[in-house]
Amino acid sequence: MKTVRELIKEAESRLDDEHKDVNVAKVLFYHLAHKEPHELYLMMNEEVDPELEAAFLKGMDQYYQGTPIQYIKGYETFFGRDFIVNEDVLIPRYETEELVENILYRIDDYFSDDREIHLCDVGTGSGAIAITLALEEPRLKVIATDISEKALAVAKENASRLSASVEFRAGDLLEPLLKTNEKVDIFVSNPPYIPDDQEIEAMVKDNEPHVALFGGNDGLYFYRRIFQEVKPLLKEKALLAFEMGFDQRELMEEAIHQFFGDHPFEIIKDMNGKDRMLFIYYHLK
């Protein structure tokens, strides 16, 4: 039988040869072994149980063939919580954690005196944004929408597992909110923003749902639709928060001026120094 070290080294060597992420081998192994990362180093010279080795080799084979490690594991960690993910939902990214963090900061800045805050998350996918915000800020009453019934099934399962109070609705963009005349203090969305003809990593393009990735010719199709339709949803004073493409600042500024006039807004850089978050202050400043 091989030791843990030998098994992982063999996988890392092949990953390196195929120019793939060598960290995947350790990530998959400690997931299957139900160990924490630091525990893995204490067992490097132990022999691997045949069942565990077989499961590891099967998972690695899936990865070599192009399946994201998150789909192989069945979850991704977001804001310290494990969210179920599959081919029906976009895999949550760290950049989106930064969006959630910045929304929480602004709740403290603009809604500190409110006993109840109404928030909607449009295009919720796995529910990562809506569920995290509901758990982090108890004053929030959250409605989350998605056009995909399969995505909503994943989001509902995540909310149930994490004991989050979120109301889920199916429908195209704002439609399920407008038809019930909802009014929100905070509007959140991470819509598809990749231009249709932009080349993206094969593992993303071949696995993650295109409905959650591509946003028209210039990537701003869904933003313009939201900007045009959103005002009936907003309370007299409201915050709008979006994730955006790092190279869309000029186009985004044009769209904001077209639909929101002189309302103040800011585009914030992520930890990598890329334009990534948009906040529109509707009568808030």
Image (spheres, rainbow, N blue to C red):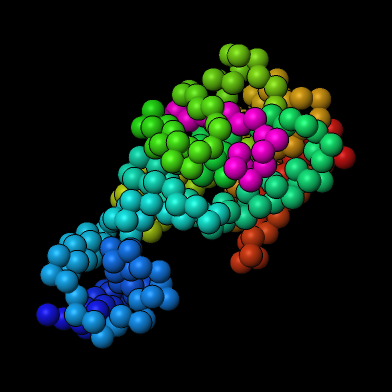
Report whether 18 appears left or right of 110: left
Quadrant in which the N terminus is drawn: bottom left
Instruction: State the residue at coordinates (48%, 42%).
Output: 162
First to last magenta residue range: 133-148
Report whether 54 appears left or right of 102: left
- The x and y percentages for residue 225 are 59, 29
Report whether 6 appears left or right of 37: left
Residue 250 appears in the rendering: no
Residue 106 appears in the rendering: yes
Instruction: State the residue at coordinates (65%, 30%).
Output: 141
Query: Is 263 drawn above or below residue 24 in the view shown?
Result: above
- The x and y percentages for residue 29 are 29, 69
Instruction: State the residue at coordinates (46%, 55%).
Output: 77
Residue 121's image quarter?
top right
Magenta stretch encompasses residue 46? no
Numbered marks: total: 0
Query: Is 112 drawn above or below residue 17 in the view shown?
Result: above
Instruction: State the residue at coordinates (49%, 47%).
Output: 194
- The x and y percentages for residue 183 are 70, 22
Residue 157's image quarter?
top left
**Residue extending furthest toward the right:** 285
Magenta stretch encompasses residue 137? yes
Quadrant in which the C terminus is drawn: top right
Query: Is 114 drawn above or below residue 269 in the view shown?
Result: above
Which of the pair 157/173 is nearer the observer? Answer: 157
Residue 167's image quarter?
top right
Query: Is 173 drawn above or below residue 136 in the view shown?
Result: above
- The x and y percentages for residue 158 are 44, 40
Report whether 183 appears left or right of 222: right
